[in-house]
Image: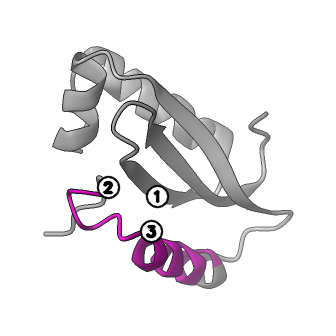
Amino acid sequence: MIILESGVYAILDERTHQMYIGSAKCIKSRVAYHRSQLKRGKHYNIGLQEAFFARHPLRYIPLIQYDRYDKKAIASVERQLIQAFRTQDPRYGFNVYN
């Protein structure tokens, strides 16, 4: 169950096993934003949007939760997980940086 804590979360495409890793001050609100944007066809991440349109099951998973918001610590963990799961590589994930 996703609760209100800040932290790092993943969105997993259960069909392809590709993953998006993100962080938020409030995971619950951030997940709601992702869902809303995907449903409206307005998500900034093209890979996630295409997976949603293709009706791939997307699962939202809290990975690490904190009781208090520490932006630097959370961003550091997010970067480490992106590297560990190789989610910047389109074969494994949806994390794209311009």
Task: State the quadrant of the C terminus.
Answer: bottom left
Q: Is residue 44 left or right of residue 37?
A: left
At 31% from the left edge and 15% from the top edge, which residue is drawn?
55
For the point 53% across and 50% down, the residue is: 10
Label annotation for residue 61: none
What residue is disc 1 on?
A: 21
- Within-10-Å neighbours for mark 3: few <14, some 14–19, many 20+: some
Q: Is residue 26 visible?
A: no
Mark 2, residues whose alpha carbon is within 10 Å: few (<14), some, or many (≥20)? many
| Colouring scheme applied when the structure was drawn | one colour
**Residue found at the far left of this picture:** 98
For residue 87, side relative to residue 6 (left or right) = left
User: Range of the magenta residues?
Assistant: 74-93
Asked if residue 15 is positioned above or below residue 87 in the image, the reply reads: above
Residue 23 % position (x, y): 54, 60
Q: Position of residue 73 (x, y in %)?
A: 65, 83
Indicate which disc residue 85 carries. 3
Instruction: Say above or below: 54 vs 1.
Output: above
Amino acid type of the residue that numbered disc 2 sits on in the rendered structure? Gly
Pointer 3 with pointer 2, Cβ within 8 A: yes
* Labels 3 and 1 touching (C-beta < 8 A): yes
Q: Is residue 60 above or below residue 10?
A: above
Does label 3 or label 1 sit earlier along the sequence? 1
